[in-house]
Image (cartoon, rainbow, N blue to C red):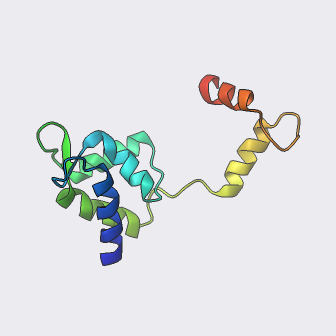
Amino acid sequence: VAEIEKKITEAFEVFDRESNKTVDVREIGCIVRSLGCFPSEAEVHELVAKVGEEEPGGFIHLEKFLPVMTKVLLDRSYQPIPEDVLLHAFEALDENKCGYITKEDLVKYLSEE
């Protein structure tokens, strides 16, 4: 647990621009994802709600974030999509079955589809 808490604290400190053990609530998703978790935006909002009340100005304090995030990591919440599922999705987008997707097609799928 101590090792996990150290990892969380280090990730948190990257976004603690004023070195006062707080981060902007809008940075929580980046912190969580930097720790190898992949929550949706809705899940990030749920996580922020679990952390509890924000400090004035929309900041989250490390002491409130640490126990919630420790539980997330211990429970292995927000795991990435399995590699075979991603591969299947890319194969479905590879209409010509050439083994790759062009940049243009990827941009089109991500912005239009």
Answer left or right for 55 relative to 100.
left
Is residue 89 in view?
yes
Is residue 1 in view?
no
Residue at image point 39% right, 47% down: 30
Picture quadrant of residue 94:
top right
Picture quadrant of residue 4:
bottom left
Specify the farthest residue to the top.
112
Answer left or right for 109 relative to 70.
right
Picture quadrant of residue 75:
bottom left
Residue at image point 59% right, 53% down: 81
Q: Quadrant of the N terminus?
A: bottom left
Instruction: Work out whether residue 103 or residue 113 is closer to the camera in this orientation and state it.
Output: 103
Q: Quadrant of the C terminus?
A: top right
Residue 86 vs 35, above or below: the answer is above
Q: Where does residue 74 sit, x and y in percent of width and height? A: 39, 70
Residue at image point 37% right, 52% down: 31
Numbered-mark total: 0
Answer left or right for 86 relative to 46.
right
Residue 77 vs 2, above or below: the answer is above
Specify the farthest residue to the left.
56
Answer left or right for 103 relative to 13.
right
Q: Where does residue 59 sit, x and y in percent of width and height? A: 19, 43
Specify the farthest residue to the bottom.
2
Q: Where does residue 90 sit, x and y in percent of width and height? A: 74, 43
Q: Where does residue 5 sit, x and y in percent of width and height? A: 30, 69
